[in-house]
Image (cartoon, helix red, strand yellow):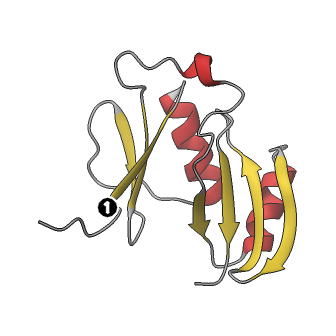
Amino acid sequence: MTVTGPDFLALQVSDLERSANFYETLLGLRRAPVSPPHAVVFATEPIAFAVREPMPGFDLDAVRPWAGAGVALWLHADDSQAVHDVLVEAGVRIVSAPAPGPFGLTFSFSDPDGYVVTIHDEV
């Protein structure tokens, strides 16, 4: 038996449509043709990404302001600076400013539930 690696990633969010619209409108992610009723799955590659209602018994308010503490979520973009500029224009909190690094121009922002997401533009 062998585990081959990550295959699916979902963030538990307080308002499903607000978060889905955030990722769709500001980051340009496209919704997958099919999602379960409690989630919005995006057509991302190579790993599927989704936002979902909290699992039964999970209290998202109990982990604020540190939603996702200890998890590093990185998303690839064709143009990190352009994504950064759209987020700034929309009033999104930028956690770390764009800076060159081993994965291209990289910056981090905070999503509506406080998850810190890093954007980079080189693979």
Q: Quadrant of the N terminus?
A: bottom left
Residue 35 lies left or right of residue 49; in this view the side is left
Image coords of residue 75 (percent x, y):
58, 64
Residue 60 lies left or right of residue 30; in this view the side is right
- Determine whether 61 is above or below 112 in the image: above
Q: Quadrant of the C terminus?
A: bottom right
Image coords of residue 49 (percent x, y):
42, 54
- Determine whether 35 is above or below 46 in the image: above
Furthest residue toward front = 1
Image coords of residue 28 (percent x, y):
58, 60
Q: In the structure shown, which secondary structural element does the residue marked by tag 1 occupy?
A: loop
Q: Amino acid at mark 1?
A: Asp
Along the viewing direction, whichever of 29 and 105 lies nearer the viewer:
105
- Determine whether 9 is above or below 16 in the image: below
Name the residue rendered at 61%, 45% in the picture. Answer: 70
Residue 105 lies left or right of residue 73; in this view the side is right
Name the residue rendered at 62%, 34% in the picture. Answer: 67
Residue 1 lies left or right of residue 62; in this view the side is left
Name the residue rendered at 35%, 62% in the picture. Answer: 6
How packed mark 1 is, by other alpha carbons closer than 10 Å (few <14, some 14-19, many 20 or more), is: few
Kindly identify which residue carries mark 1.
7
Name the residue rendered at 64%, 32% in the picture. Answer: 113
Along the viewing direction, whichever of 88 and 63 lies nearer the viewer:
63
Residue 39 image-quadrant placement: top left
Furthest residue toward left = 1
Image coords of residue 114 (percent x, y):
69, 36
